[in-house]
Image: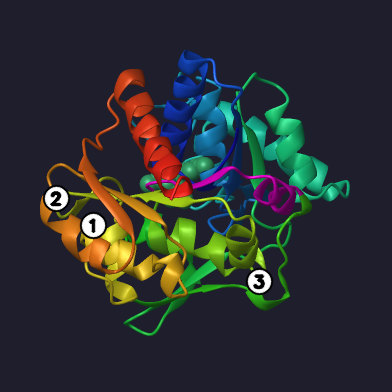
Amino acid sequence: MRHVVIGGGVGCARYVRGLREHVRRTGADGEIDVVVNTADDWWVSGLRISPDHDSILYTLAGQNDDERGWGRRGESERVSAELSEWGATPGWFTLGDLDLATHIARTSWLRAGDSVSDVFARLGSRWDLGATLHPATDHEIDTHVVTADGRRMHFQEWWVRERAAVPALRFEQQRIAEARPSASALESLAAADVVLLAPSNPVVSIGPVLAVPGLRDAVLASGAPVVGVSPIIGGSVVRGMADACLAAIGVETDAAAVALHYGSRSRGGLLDGWLVAEEDPDAVAPVQSAGIACRSIPLWMRDADTSAALAAEALRLAAEIAAR
Ligand code: FO1
């Protein structure tokens, strides 16, 4: 059973951890691939940072800082403080000492000519992750934000320096038209038995993956059922400031609205199934009438049990869809 998850960041990391737990518990012959968003990536202090990837890598390796949601557990910031003294890094962006080693390794391999896919493979080989991470594309497609006050900045500047407090007009992945899916992402999707959209930010984590020319077609061509999980519970986003992103593209912060944003496969969209929280029972009917199978279940991923249960529910819905 080949599971392919699409997403990035903390929500995706926890969801993949839950799926891994479910596969381990059921002893199913499950393989897990993750097609990871790289549009959050950023060149800072001469280093390539890859937040959505590193959150998943560190979480599956048990090395993540669960409270902060990014970076390494047991972190220190001696180098970051010194970089700040030199004025060699923006003071508002913290690079932990252990995290810096990841960025230095990644940057040295990229400078030596490795592709992003090569870097994913090298970083992923250190720990037994129980999943294989693939970049959506090997091209640099950094998201820039055009703000209502007329500025353009990198997503990280908007997200961290501005705390997403400045209304965004548009999110633009750079040179996305020339980007192509990575070979390993295409290979995973072609072999997928199920495609799972993680409860990630629909605009800056899932959106950029689907925007890579050819990626969306590869999802649909796989013939595998596509099941997503709402990143909104009880009318609020679970993490981060995804509501600021949704507002910019005119999508309500609502479990049904996000499903309709992705659209149903039967009407030219992507989704066959969608899970909403038990706090959002009213979202089920509008999603179903859009041609997407939908059910309302517990979505909070608090620990291994709840995360594994959520993954199991997504797979159950996918199996019902496939059996139609
Ligand atoms: N988020 C912050 O709010 N402040 C930071 O200083 C910060 C540093 C940082 C360093 C490496 C990394 O991988 C992520 C980091 N993040 C930080 C999180 C990151 O900006 C966002 O969480 C993601 O890009 C959103 O998906």
Instruction: Say if mark 3 contacts mark 2, CB within 8 Å.
Output: no
Q: Amino acid at mark 3?
A: Pro
Q: Quadrant of the N terminus?
A: top right
Q: Which residue is mark 2?
A: 280
Residue in the picture at 63% in, 51% down: 45
Q: Amino acid at mark 2?
A: Asp
Tag 1 secondary structure: helix
Q: Which residue is mark 3?
A: 213
Q: CA distance from mark 2 to mark 1?
A: 7 Å
Instruction: Say if mark 3 contacts mark 1, CB within 8 Å.
Output: no
Q: Can you give x and y, in whole percent of width and height, for residue 14 in the image? A: 41, 32
Instruction: Say if mark 2 contacts mark 1, CB within 8 Å.
Output: yes
Mark 1 nearby-residue class (10 Å; few <14, some 14–19, many ≥20): many
Ligand 1 lies under 8 Å from the Cβ of mark 3: no
Residue in the picture at 37% in, 53% down: 273
Q: Can you give x and y, in whole percent of width and height, for residue 200 in the image? A: 40, 50
Residue in the picture at 81% in, 42% down: 109
Q: CA distance from mark 3 to mark 1?
A: 27 Å
Quadrant position of residue 42: bottom right
Mark 2 nearby-residue class (10 Å; few <14, some 14–19, many ≥20): many
